[in-house]
């Protein structure tokens, strides 16, 4: 009698086997491959300062992506994040014209982000409106206010000390932005994976009605998530405005697509209920390496936009195609 090999279900695999089969490990392999390809394609890529500059391609977006990941896991989305950056930057720029201090500018940026996040949260959780519709509306509203205030003008004249947030270095080639990105990754990783709040987010994303009957305050949790997304957009606005040294109403235009792509590429289900912060961190590096590598090769920005759009479609479609192929 011959032995018949049986497939062991994933749930019976060892933790090491499950880790090797995870999306995060696959994504990490892709990041390593892109790093090697970039080093071979351009002789300038491995320069320490160039690698440091490469981090600026993703740190600000990744800060928002951490909060966006929790929001999408809960079954909601916020497409107004880039417009929140524009409005927060405009508010800081207007205040800078009155020679306010750095602390005041930071508080204005964070406060504007929180107010915008609260506004989205009230409309979604308080009035029961679909988040995708609400945030498409506020995306136009927030950036429209920036255009009304600024028009074709530019706000400059920020205090010299304000430049540290977007241009300063903590040690050698390690920028302040990168340190902040790493700290936020740890904070959001603990929040999502090690706390009751994180477990509530997963429960809501998988079954909001069941979560409600389990005693989870669904609307309250979702409102906090919109606040967090607004907060991180405000922090990103501080870093981006500091790095650029000026404010235009078109600042961060199109970033909402890149943030969502980063989140979905990191393994967060667009339908909610699953995903991880480590996946988003690795996805941030992948997108940063790709865009920086293309930049070193003088690839036009429009080509990068096309690539990001195709990447988003591919990441959303691949799991579905894989499922169809398995049952074909």
Image: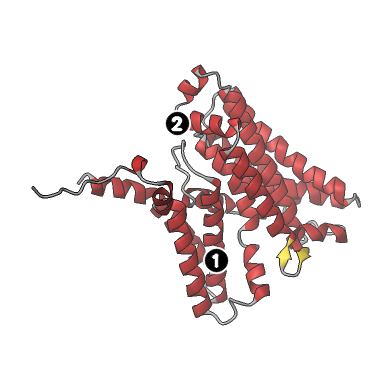
Q: In this view, does 247 lie above or below 141?
A: below
Q: Residues within 10 Å of mark 1 (few under 14, many from 20)?
A: many
Give the percent coordinates (x, y) of residue 256: 57, 49
Q: Is residue 212 above or below residue 77?
A: above
Residue 38 vs residue 135, the one in the foreground: 38
The answer to whether residue 80 is visible is no
List the single residue furthest toward the front. Answer: 1
List the single residue furthest toward the left. Answer: 1
Give the side of residue 51 with respect to residue 73, left or right. right
Circle number at residue 208: none
Residue at 57 percent of width and 28 percent of height = 124
Q: In this view, does 5 lie above or below 132?
A: below
Residue 186 vs residue 219, the one in the foreground: 186
Q: Is mark 1 on a helix, strand or loop?
A: helix
Q: Which residue position holds label 1? A: 289
Residue at 79 percent of width and 56 percent of height = 155
Give the percent coordinates (x, y) of residue 41: 50, 79
Residue 66 vs residue 121, the one in the foreground: 66
Residue at 66 percent of width and 44 percent of height = 187
| Quadrant housing residue 115 | top right
Q: What element carries label 2?
A: helix
Circle number at residue 206: 2
- Color theme of the render: secondary structure
Residue 313 vs residue 26, the one in the foreground: 26
The answer to whether residue 296 is visible is yes
Residue at 77 percent of width and 45 percent of height = 109
Give the side of residue 160 with respect to residue 50, left or right. right
Give the percent coordinates (x, y) of residue 198: 57, 34
How far is mark 1 from mark 2, CA to CA?
Answer: 33 Å
| Quadrant housing residue 220 | top right
Give the percent coordinates (x, y) of residue 261: 50, 52
- Mark 1 vs 2, N-terminal side: 2
């Amino acid at each position: 009698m011959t032995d018949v090999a049986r497939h062991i279900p994933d749930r019976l695999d060892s933790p090491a086997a499950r880790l090797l089969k995870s999306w995060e490990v696959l994504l990490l392999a892709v990041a390593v491959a892109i790093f090697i390809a970039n080093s071979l394609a351009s002789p300038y890529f491995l320069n320490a300062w160039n690698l440091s500059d490469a981090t600026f391609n993703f740190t600000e977006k990744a800060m928002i992506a951490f909060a966006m990941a929790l929001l999408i896991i809960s079954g909601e989305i916020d497409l107004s994040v880039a417009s929140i950056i524009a409005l927060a930057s405009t508010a800081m720029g207007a205040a800078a014209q009155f020679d306010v201090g750095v602390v005041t500018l930071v508080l204005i940026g964070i406060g504007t982000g929180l107010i915008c996040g609260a506004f989205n949260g009230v409309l979604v959780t308080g009035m029961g409106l679909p988040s995708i519709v609400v945030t498409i509306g506020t995306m136009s509203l927030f950036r429209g206010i920036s255009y009304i205030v600024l028009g074709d003008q530019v706000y400059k004249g920020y205090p010299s000390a304000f430049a540290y947030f977007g241009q300063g270095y903590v040690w050698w080639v390690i920028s302040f932005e990168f340190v902040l990105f790493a700290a936020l990754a740890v904070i959001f990783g603990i929040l999502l994976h090690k706390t009751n709040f994180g477990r509530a987010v997963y429960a809501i994303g998988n079954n909001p009605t069941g979560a409600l009957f389990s005693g989870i305050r669904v609307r309250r949790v979702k409102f906090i998530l919109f606040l967090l997304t607004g907060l991180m957009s405000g922090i990103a606005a501080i870093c981006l405005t500091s790095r650029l040294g000026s404010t235009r109403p078109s600042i961060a235009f199109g970033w909402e697509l890149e943030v969502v792509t980063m989140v979905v590429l990191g393994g967060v289900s667009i339908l909610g209920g699953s995903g991880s912060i480590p996946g988003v961190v690795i996805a941030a590096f992948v997108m940063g390496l790709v865009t920086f590598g293309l930049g070193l090769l003088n690839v036009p920005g429009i080509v990068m936009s096309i690539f990001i759009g195709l990447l988003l479609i591919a990441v959303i479609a691949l799991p579905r195609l894989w499922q169809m192929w398995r049952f074909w």
